[in-house]
Image: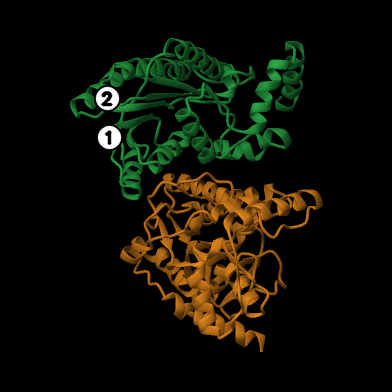
Chain colours: A orange, B green
Amino acid sequence: MNIFISGATGFIGRALSLTLAEQGHTIHALSRRNNHPLLPVHPNIRVFLGDISSKNSLVAAMQGCEQAYHTAALAKMWTKNKNEFHEVNVAGTRNILEAANEAGVGKIVHTSSCGVIGPTLKYPMTEEDPRITGFPIHYERTKYLAELEVREFVKKGMNVVIASPSRVYGKGPITDSNTVGKIVTAYLRGKWRVNPANGRQVSNYAYLDDVVQGHIAAMQHGIAGHRYILGGEDVSFNAFFDTVRQLSGVHHRLINVPQPAIKWYSWIEWLKTSITGQPPFFLPEFADRLKYDQKYSSQKAIDQLGYRITPFPEGMQQMIQYYLQQKN
Amino acid sequence: MHTSAAIITGASEGLGKFMAIEMASRGYHLVLVALPGTGLPQLAQFLIKNFSICAHYFEMDLTEVDNCVALFQSLRTQHIQADILINNAGIGNNDWFDDKCICFYAKQITLNVMAPVVLTRLFIDHPCHAKQRYILNVGSLGGIFVVPKKGVYGATKSFIRHFTKSLQIELRNTNISISLLSPGGINTKPELLVLHDSLKGISRVTVLEPEVVAKKAIDGMFKGKKEIIPGIFNRIFVWLKGLLPNIIQEMIIHRNMKNVL
């Protein structure tokens, strides 16, 4: 089967492309350039030059495809041009869906994010729970607006399913969106010294291989217009670093930094960025998020898609091994 | 745990939802009111689960006086006391006057003006043993500043402001405290998220997140504040309005109009 994938150089899209190619499908991988260092290489992967901001290039790349995965997004904390978030994540999604409609693609999986569902009060959030904060984070706001675009196309009769991974970690290149990879490799090098919010904040960590399988299952069994959380275990920063320490044998002392201190520091970063235009290390809206847990339940995906969760220590072991091998 | 409940209208989305979360987080029982099909049962369920409170919900259209009466009637028959009323439901818009139809304006005026008046009247008569009762009426900076494209909306909020201030005098020596909330832009609905994204400079900093506004509003209500204006920049603008002569205010509005047109 011919399958279109946007964001094939991204953390999820790359792994998804390789998995589907290995299964014997022909992958139409969208890329902005031919020589992208992270382009997945496989005999079954055909690279199509194009951009999600240009609908014509998308229609061309989707010709003959029965399925499309839209994993491309601007998943950064910050960009110089704020409109870029809207252009890539919202207008880009609209272009993908319009192009898929024109090219006659049968089913689409749109990669969203648990960031759209937002932070947690007490119990892990489900797909149907109401959001408890606004959308101060550009990425989350534009991914929410992208989901609204998807809903509009579903209303018009298109078969689009929403996959919502939580914080994804696993064996893959260190990219802007691969925050777990950045933290773990920095820790292993002794460059990560901070235990944020005294280590008590709990987040949900989804193993990349699970997320890839979840995408494929969403394509097979997902119901149009439905959203499926593809998560993993809820883990606190303390437990996170304990696991990394145990598995790697690398022991670095971390400094507990309380949330208010991080908030103050983030304002300094914000000011620095506002004046110099240089990328910030951290921003106030992200410091605020440390006040909340981000726990998610993947029960719907487990029940309806047969989604499976790799235990956190097992996934982390694979990831650490992968990075240690890369280093050597 | 409190034995009586807080009524919140327009509770399913926007600021109302965030005030419901804020009140629930403080352990108050809730009576949530919103239109059918807006996710109200899910919100009530979510708040019951996470905060171990009671949350009753009524899916109804408050532009019908009969529904307002029926709401308090059912509270009476279910023996639900209400010590707090938050008149939040309202319809906002940002359109040239002749771009909207007459039925829109009729509905907007009915919901923004008639419903709070009727509900306030019913609330005052509703039996309640609480020592202190609170009313929070949601106005807007649009009820203070005259701007284009918000003529009818601003006028309804100006009505709420006048109404609330008058009742503050009337209810001075009673156990009912009535506050006015006058927020600026809030990042709530999708179209507002897009609109606010396009703002620059000083207009951008006046826009606040809904959970921030909700917290300030509830804090202010319990303190018995007469008018709550969230956001330092918004307070400065209101203060400046009192200082600047009308002619200069008009100049500023006309200058900004050029950017809009």
Which chain is home to disc 2?
A: B
Residues at marks 1 and 2 touching, judged by CB atoms closer than 8 Å: yes
Which residue in the protein does label 2 denote?
Answer: B129
Q: Residue furthest left?
A: B77
Q: Position of residue B179 (x, y in %)?
A: 48, 22
Q: Is residue A183 above or below residue B154?
A: below
Q: Position of residue A276 (x, y in %)?
A: 81, 52
Query: Can residue A71 be seen by looking at this rendering?
Result: no
The residue type indicated by label 2 comes to: His
The quarter of the rendered structure image containing the C terminus of chain A is bottom right
Q: Is residue A274 above or below residue A186?
A: above
**Secondary structure of the residue carrying numbered label 1:** loop
Q: Closest to the observer: B237 or A212?
A: B237
Local packing at callout 2 (Cα closer than 10 Å; few below 14, some 14-19, many 20+) is: few
Which residue in the protein does label 1 denote?
Answer: B3
Q: Closest to the observer: A18 or B245?
A: B245
Q: What label does residue B183 carry, if any? A: none
Which chain is home to disc 1?
A: B
The residue type indicated by label 1 comes to: Thr
Q: Residue at x 70, y 26 (%)?
A: B260
Q: Position of residue B113 (x, y in %)?
A: 44, 16
